[in-house]
Image (tube, rainbow, N blue to C red):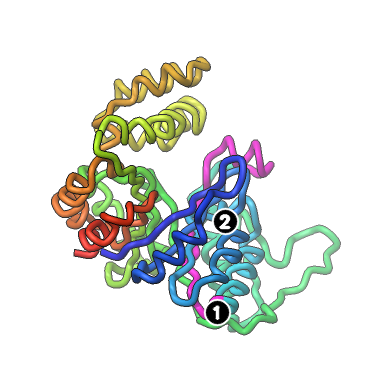
Amino acid sequence: MKVGISAGYWGAGPPVGVERQLAEAESLGVDSFWTAEAYGSDALTPLAWWGSRTTSIKLGTSICQISARTPTALSMAAMTLDHLSGGRVLLGIGASGPQVVEGWYGQSYPRPLERTREYVEIMRLVMAREEPVAFEGRHYQLPLEGGAGLGKALKSTIHPVRPAIPILLGAEGPKNVALAGEIADGWLPLWFSPKSDAFYRDALAEGRARPGAHATADGFEVACTVWMVEHDDVEVAASFLKPTLALYIGGMGARGANFHHDVFVRMGWRDECEAIQDRYLAGDRDGAIELVPTEMVEDVALVGPADKMVEEIERKWRSTCITTMILGGWPREDTRERILAAVRG
C-alpha cells in the first residue's frame, strides 16, 4: 500500500502548514498529494500552487466536480498541469450531489452515471489528441447542435506529455463504484470501512466484467482518504471528527438523497444515521454531533495513540482493496515513520 496526504478543500481560508507538510512528505517518499473542492476553494489552483514546490510527488484531485467544468475544459487544465509538473497528475472526478450540482453550479443532476460516462469518454478523446474531437451524446455534443451553427470539431493545441492521464472516479454507491471499475483507471472512495471491503470488491468486479470495460484489476488504483487524529485519549481524538461525520451523514444532501448517509447505513448504522439526520435537518447540529458513536468514527478513521493506529492499519486496512491510503492528517514527528511504515507494510 502506498501513502498519500491530503489538503482537502478549505474552510474560511487556506489550511495552515501545507507547504511544510508537503516538503516533509516528499522527503519521506510519500507517493501522492491530493486536493478537493465543494463550493469554495477549487481543486486545481491549490494543487498547481503547492505542487510547484515539489519535484516527484504525484498531484491528485479528489475530486474535481464534473458539473463545474465542461469535459474539454477539465482536460485542458489537466494537460496543462501535467506539462508543468512533468507528468505527475492524477485526475480524480466525481458527480457530487443534487444540492451542489443544481444549487451551486446551476446544472441538471439526473442521470449522473450516464453523464459521467460521456464526460470520461470525451476527456480521453481530448487527451489522446488523435483527431478533432466530435461527440454525440445525450448530455454533451461536440460541436454543439443548434446555437450559431458555426461550431467546428477541434483538436487540442497542447501536445500531451502522456497519451492518457489516469482518471479516477469518486464514487460511494454500488452502481457508481461499478462504473469506476468499468470505465476508470481508479476509484476514490469516501468513508470507506474495512468491514465493507467485500461489498466494494464485488462492485468493482461487476464493472470490470462488463463488455468493453476499460479497467482491469492490474494497475487499478484505489486511493482512499482515511482521516487520522493522533491523541493518547481515543474519545478526545474521535471528538475532532464527530462534527464532520454529523455534517456528512446529516446535512450533506437532502433526506433520501444523501449518499454519505447511505454509506454508513450499509455499514450497519441505520438507526444512528436516522437519528443524526433528524437532528441535523431540524437545525440541532450539536445534538447531531452528540449522537455520533466513537465506534462509528473508528469504522472509517484512525483515531487514538500511534500504537492503536499501527495495529489497526496492519490488522484491518492493509488487506483491503485500497492501494493508496491518503492520510487525512499528518502524524507527529516522533511517530511519523512508524505509521508510514505500517501503511507501506
Quarter of the image where one finds residue 230? top left
Taking the spot 33% from the left edge, 60% from the top edge, the residue there is 222
Taking the spot 17% from the left edge, 49% from the top edge, the residue there is 316
Taking the image as shown, residue 80 lies to the left or right of residue 238, namely: right
Residue 20 in the image: state x and y as whole percent. Answer: 48, 61
Q: Which residue is mark 2?
A: 43
Taking the spot 28% from the left edge, 26% from the top edge, the residue there is 293
Q: Which residue is mark 1?
A: 128
Please state which amino acid type lies under the numbered disc 1: Ala
Give the secondary structure at mark 1: helix
The magenta-colored residue range is: 85-108
Taking the image as shown, residue 301 lies to the left or right of residue 245, namely: left
Residue 173 in the image: state x and y as whole percent. Answer: 38, 43
Taking the image as shown, residue 138 lies to the left or right of residue 342, namely: right
Taking the spot 20% from the left edge, 59% from the top edge, the residue there is 342
Can you see residue 299?
Answer: no
Residue nearest the observer in this picture, 293 or 190 = 293
Q: Quadrant of the N terminus?
A: bottom left
Quarter of the image where one finds residue 275? top left
Q: Is residue 168 above or below residue 114?
A: below
Counting labels gives: 2
Residue 299 in the image: state x and y as whole percent. Answer: 25, 39
Please state which amino acid type lies under the numbered disc 2: Ala
Question: Are the residues flagged by discs 2 and 1 in contact, CB closer than 8 Å?
Answer: no
Q: Closer to the observer: label 2 or label 1? A: 2
The residue positioned farthest toward the right in the image shown:
148
Q: Is residue 191 above or below residue 247?
A: below
